[in-house]
Amino acid sequence: MPQAQRIIAIANQKGGVGKTTTSINLATALAACGRSVLLVDFDPQGNASTGLGVEDRIHNSYSVIAGSSTADVAIQATQVPRLDIIPTIVDLSAAEVELSDMPDREFRLKMAIRRISKQYQYVIIDCPPSLGMLTVNALTAATSVLVPLQCEFYALEGLSQLMRTVEAVRAGLNGDLQMQGIVLTMFDTRNKLSAMVASDVRTHFGDLVYKTVVPRNVRVSEAPSFGQPVLIYDLKCPGSQAYAALAAELLRQESKAA
């Protein structure tokens, strides 16, 4: 099996920006492109696990970092060929406190997935909507961070806070951490604000912003309630097409960097 080309943390401390939706559907699209992918659900809400229809969560990301399970035992196959998942449970929220007393507290996830990550070409980590110890663990384990950014008024303000955290992790914990990119989500073509925010973000961050923009799409919102990625739920809808395009753009980005 190939070494993991990328361990990508999908992070944004703001909730409701499409972080989990991006994690699920980017992972699905990469798998559909023939890549071997592991999705690590590292958000105590467990929405990535629910969105992929995972019910058995006895072994999970909380038990893995707590040391009561190993990552290889926690891995499950999903309905998507070439896509596996380490699910999570709400108990992961307790880890924010528990990690403070653990040795190597910032490196628990990195140590847990070090060996199994070599089985995959991509590892996607769905981070919680905060900048606490769980997100720090994800950024320490990652080779890069991808930021979903909702096209709304305060988007840039929240992004600058996240970028400071990324820089702090790079300076003190993970010197190899890179910015994978920023993907604009929930773009509403009827709303002038969406276009203004997109223009501002591109002005500030240039080539870090993906050309692909994920639109607001009711099919994307419906898919998780059926335990399916939107690419399986409705392949032809605009949301599915956007995530397929995002995966293709990311793969082109990788090939240029190689």
Image: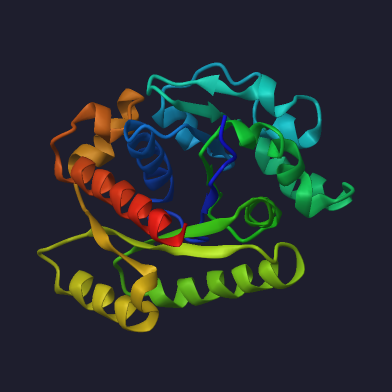
Q: Is residue 119 left or right of residue 122?
A: right
Tell me what residue is drawn at x 21 percent, y 45 percent. Answer: 239
* Viewer-side residue, 194 vs 182: 182
Write down the quadrant of residue 88 in the picture: top right
Number of callouts: 0
Residue 245 rendering spot, x and y as whole percentages: 24, 49
- 129, above or below 208, in the image: above
Q: Is residue 38 visible?
A: yes
Write down the quadrant of residue 135 in the picture: bottom right
Q: Is residue 43 left or right of residue 74?
A: left
Tell me what residue is drawn at x 56 percent, y 35 percent. Answer: 2
Q: Which residue of the protein is positioned furthest toward the front in this rendering?
A: 258
* Viewer-side residue, 230 vs 121: 121
* Viewer-side residue, 240 vs 223: 240
* Viewer-side residue, 63 vs 96: 63
Residue 154 rendering spot, x and y as whole percentages: 38, 74
Q: Is residue 162 left or right of residue 196?
A: right
Residue 78 rendering spot, x and y as whole percentages: 44, 21
Q: Is residue 59 visible?
A: no
Residue 139 rendering spot, x and y as whole percentages: 63, 56
- 172, above or below 252, in the image: below
Tell me what residue is drawn at x 58 percent, y 58 percent. Answer: 130
> In which quadrant of the rendered image does the N terminus lie?
top right
Colour theme:
rainbow
Tell me what residue is drawn at x 53 percent, y 29 percent. Answer: 85
- 205, above or below 116, in the image: below
